[in-house]
Amino acid sequence: MTVVESRAGTGTGSTSMVVSADRGGVEVVERWADAWRRLCDEFVDDQPFYHPEWISAHIRAFTPKANVLLLTVTLEGRLCLVLPLLEERALFHGLPLRTLRAPVNSHSCRFDAVRCPGREGDLAVRALWEHLKELPAWDLLELSYVPKDGTLSALALAAAADRFHTAQVPMIPNPYIPIPSDPARLLELPANKKLRSQLRGIRRELTGRGQLKLQRVCDANRAILQRFYELESAGWKGAEGSAISCTPQTQQFYDEISKSAETFGYLCIYTLEFDGQLLASHLGLSYKGRYFSPKVAYDENFKQWAPGQLIVEEIIRDCSARDVREYDITGPNDAWKAKWTSQTHPQCIQFIFRKGIPGNLAHAIRFRLRPWLKKVTGRARSKKR
């Protein structure tokens, strides 16, 4: 492991922030894990996906040989900001670049740098950028699944202020449902009236035939996890090879995340049964008044009962009773989610290009040449019609 430090004044006398760049493997994440989690408690938008256990699980499962670069900003020994990155040599639209990218993929849900609140947090972002722009051996900073107005968006603004090329590319937003505490208002969900009526009819039918039971489990019981994996793989996800159990790396990630979520008290596995028959299940998280559902599954043999929608309704009722005020559905804004809510959390990919020939050329290809070619091609096709 190698560590490089720099200092930046805070404007408060002689006190300065120390920016460190730790390089190595997953051990550099674990080295900072305790202080990182304490900082998460201060973060205004604290979510499980930003915690060290999520980052280390991703690295161990998907990029075990990666070169990890962990950037930290401290003030008088107290951690103020942390940003984990992977150092890679990769092609960017055919151009080989030295890339610093976020340690995430589609299973990570979201990514952001964690920082302390207020003016100190703002100064930490600036100190981080001052260090980054002087850090050698990178051409592109690529940050995916980033909240539009989060810490990393502030980092991109600092880069743009120094006349570095930056770009913000929107990703499909994540829908969320504000959960009312008033039982009467729960009857107004889902927002789609047709689905609301359909679910009432299904409930009347099931009530006359047997017992519908929702169960919430907060431990990573092997049998319960395996039951979820089997349910998910039995449907279309298994057929197309995208179910968790289809690849060892993906199952390793969810096994580790589930165990960590149990350890830190935010695992929330829901099951919905009808007379002992498993209809649907969520591998979810319940954290600081919000419920997240990274993975969902339902039995496609019972489509007539809309089990995927029925469990959402049951979960919302349970969350309301537990004073959980938001159901963050996570993932893209699919059609079934839009029936519940029109509210979304925007997310994006943030690009920062280093000054110099490789970075300038990469920016020109992606954000000038490609749009121009697309426009010219579109005109040519219109003329042929």
Image: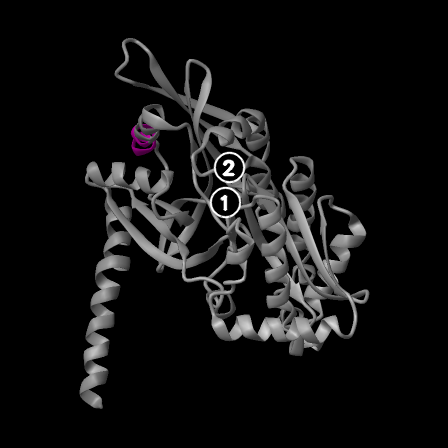
User: Residue 371 appears in which quarter of the rendering?
Assistant: bottom left
Dot 2 crowding, Cα within 10 Å, few <14, some 14–19, many 20+: many
Secondary-structure class at tag 2: strand
> In the rendering, at what x and y percent does residue 304 appear?
66, 79
Relative to 287, is 206 above or below?
A: below
| Type of the residue with mark 1 | Pro
Q: Which residue is mark 2?
A: 68
In the image, residue 133 lies in the stretch drawn in magenta? yes
Q: Give the farthest residue toward the bottom.
A: 385
Q: Is residue 138 visible?
A: no
In primary-sequence order, the first of circles 1 and 2 is 2
Front tag of 1 and 2: 1
Relative to 42, is 230 above or below?
A: below
| Type of the residue with mark 2 | Val
> In the rendering, at what x and y percent does residue 44 appear?
43, 35
x 28%, y 51%: residue: 167
Secondary-structure class at tag 1: loop
Residue in front for this viewpoint, 258 or 46 = 46
Q: Is residue 14 left or right of residue 107?
A: left
Predominant SS of the magenta segment: helix
Locate the N terminus by quadrant.
top right
Q: Which residues are magenta?
A: 129-134
Locate the C terminus by quadrant.
bottom left
Residue in front for this viewpoint, 142 or 263 = 263
User: Residue 17 appears in which quarter of the rendering?
Assistant: top left
The reply to whether callout 1 and callout 2 are in contact (CB within 8 Å) is yes
Give the CA distance from mark 1 to mark 2: 9 Å
Q: Which residue is mark 1?
A: 103
Q: In this figure, what is the number of numbered marks?
A: 2
Q: Is residue 156 left or right of residue 46?
A: left
